[in-house]
Amino acid sequence: MGTIKNISRRGFVKVVGLASGGLILACNTSIFSDKEKAPENLIDFNPNLFIQLNSDGTLILIASRSEMGNGVRTSLTSVIADEMEADWNKVIVKQATGDTKYGDQNTDGSRSVHYLYETMRQMGAIAKAMLISAAAQTWNVTENECSAEHHFIVHTSGKKIAFGNLVEKAKTLEIPTNFKLKNPKNFKFIGKNLKSVDVKEYNNGSAIFGLDKRIPNMKFVAIQRCPVTFGTVKSFDKTATLKIAGVIDVIEIPRVEKPFGALGGVAVIASNTWAAFKGKDALKVEWNYGDNKGYDSEKYMNQLTSNVHKNGKVGKESGNINRAFKNATKIVESTFQLPHLAHAPMEVPNAVAWVQGDTCEVWAPTQDPQTARKEVVDFLETTEDKVIINVTFLGGGFGRKSKPDYIVEAVAVSKAINAPVQVVWTREDDIKHGYYHTVSAQFMKASLDNNGNVTGWLHRFALPSIVSTFSPGVDYAAGFEISSASGVPFEIDNLKVEVGQAPAHVRIGWLRSVINIPHGFSINVFADELAHAARKDPLEFRLQLIGNDRIEDTQDEIKYNTARLKNVLKIAAKNAEWGKQLPEGHAYGLAVHYSFYSYVASVVEVSVINNKVRVHNVFTAIDCGTVVNRNTVKAQMEGSAIFGMSLAFYGKITAKNGAIEQSNYHDYKMVRMNEAPKVYVEIVESTERPTGVGEPGVPVIAPAIINAIFKATGKRYYNLPLADFGLV
């Protein structure tokens, strides 16, 4: 619960960028649980939610989170508007700049609505209560005689007064403590299908994405970076580049040795993007490749695999795994190998920056404007009050745009040439110089008794940790990467999780669903393999493996509920008509996973004909607690299906001599429209607290596809992508 204040009469109004004159409420709320220490900037009153009601009736919300197709601006607005009984057509959203006064602004981890929902409801209810009080005073009646309805306060006599006409009276009032939240059965927006508040701008082309931003006298910049991660410039020849029409200058920018610092390289400054790109191609650069030149992803995978075939560091242990294996009727073992992955959002990294002395203003598609601001402040050796980060719309993010290295690049060039610039990455830059999802090898071993019950479970994995990006030299998985394996939702008495060594050779970053991709894959495929070994139906076996309904004793703020996990599995199976006769060559596969506090199951129908795999139907069920916007949840599950299919069929980043081998969508492919299946989504009705939506739908897709292929062909695949096997 946050602290809500009426700041209409405070000087603070100017700071948050709202015009004076309206009723302005602000709230600070921490994303940190009681078991975590909140940063100092969240202890004082630093609001991250603002609403302003103006005398003309317009309702303005300052959105502190980034919009990248996730629908967050609509969700943040609708909750407040619902509790206020506001007119949806009078809602306006303004985007927050990157600033600690907005609380946590990092738009990843599927947590925006999860953390802000209750506070948004309170803000709406408080605003409504203040308007009711103002109307009651105006009419000299009791508040009990008044109610809110569609942007009006209505008296029992039938007379009514518009919200806007009550602003002057309401903004003099103190924050009430006796407000009431709506009964969920009376929700008008929450849980319904709402179109995006930004849909008009999307449709008419007025929405400003990072690539759309223009300011006077702006130069355009393309950067040639070292093919080998962390390499540096030895020398360069700009003769040919300067002969290209539109090229203005060529300069070197240094590598900034920070997790989100610029990689460094040679920057081409031009009067247009095309000239900058052509100039970059014409550059002749000699590089200091450094120690990473020896990185070979194939040899590295062999080493990871070797590491998981020997004892590792124990991450979790319960019961006696050795005794379970010794007494087993049957032992099943499998090894899984998954490659690096790239984000490859449609909009490449880009940023506009204008450094003037010790001040700087940035316009960029960023998921984390506060981190971007800090990186710029550190680079310029200035203070936060002199740096402004403006957040544009994002043409996709998937976690890539949480890392502001591309913003630091723009700032570095602007400072060097004393002019506003726009740095634009090419698709090749994006694929070859990103923060990659971790590569992994996993070894699974389980024991079965006479009845086909799992008596022992060993999961050993090795993967370069995300922590290595922040602390070079870290070569074992971190706690959160271990917990996704150790928190396996099965009722098994004897369980052991071990971690193998895995030094990083590229920048490792989070990608949509993060560690749940490799662990969700191996756990679901292996469980299906165990079902086959036990000669049991995969659905019934999985339900049996999950076991009794129980609340797991976890350290998280929300306790894990196995009944909810089994429920989504049953729903997905029911909607797919699990067990029905399918056409020849067709088969079903299933997977279920818990991540970001949400429960998701998918049943996938594939066909394997002439050794080619095609996905025809995806039946997904999600339990994400209270749903704010059904349209958003459905869209996220549909997008997750396509995203997960792309990873299963095509996703693979490899390195040779330290350089990434892939470069564009021709060799880092995505699922195309003609490959897209029908996706059916059922959202479980719930009154529980809202949980994640953007990421939880991804982990189940690839393993469900693999399990379906096995059912259709009798052949099981343990490595991805399927393109490596000629299946697509």
Image (cartoon, rainbow, N blue to C red):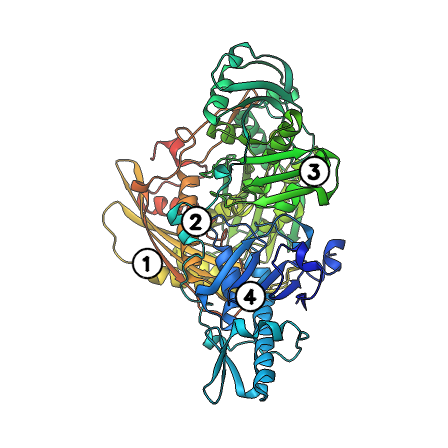
Residue pointed to by mark 2: 640
Task: Identify the disc placed on residue 359.
Answer: 3
Query: Viewer-proximal residue, 583 or 381?
Result: 381
CA distance for labels 4 and 3: 33 Å
Residue 106: x %, y % from top left: 61, 49
Relative to 256, residue 531 above or below: below
Q: Amino acid at mark 4?
A: Asn
**Residue 608 seen by the camera:** yes
Between the C-alphas of marks 2 and 1, the distance is 18 Å
Q: Are marks 2 and 3 in contact (CB under 8 Å)?
A: no
Closer-to-camera residue (497/644): 644
Mark 2 vs mark 1: in front: 2
**Residue under pointer 1:** 576
The residue where tag 4 is placed is 54
- SS at circle 2: helix
Q: Is residue 600 above or below residue 237?
A: below
Left or right? Give the position of 605 relative to 502: left
Of the image marks 1 and 3, the number of the one nearer the N terminus = 3
Marks 2 and 3 sit apart, C-alpha to C-alpha, by 40 Å
Q: Residues within 10 Å of mark 2 (few under 14, many from 20)?
A: many
Tell me the SS state at disc 4. Answer: loop
Mark 4 vs mark 2: which is more N-terminal?
A: 4
Whole-percent x, y for residue 284 in the image? 55, 12
Which of pointers 2 and 3 lies earlier in the amino acid sequence?
3
Task: Tell me which amino acid carries mark 2.
Answer: Ser
Q: Residue at x 31, y 49 (%)?
A: 587
| Type of the residue with mark 3 | Thr
Marks 1 and 4, how far apart at CA: 50 Å
Q: Amino acid at mark 1?
A: Ala
Residue in the foreground of this view, choosing between 59 and 409: 59
Cα gap from disc 1 to disc 3, whole angstroms = 58 Å
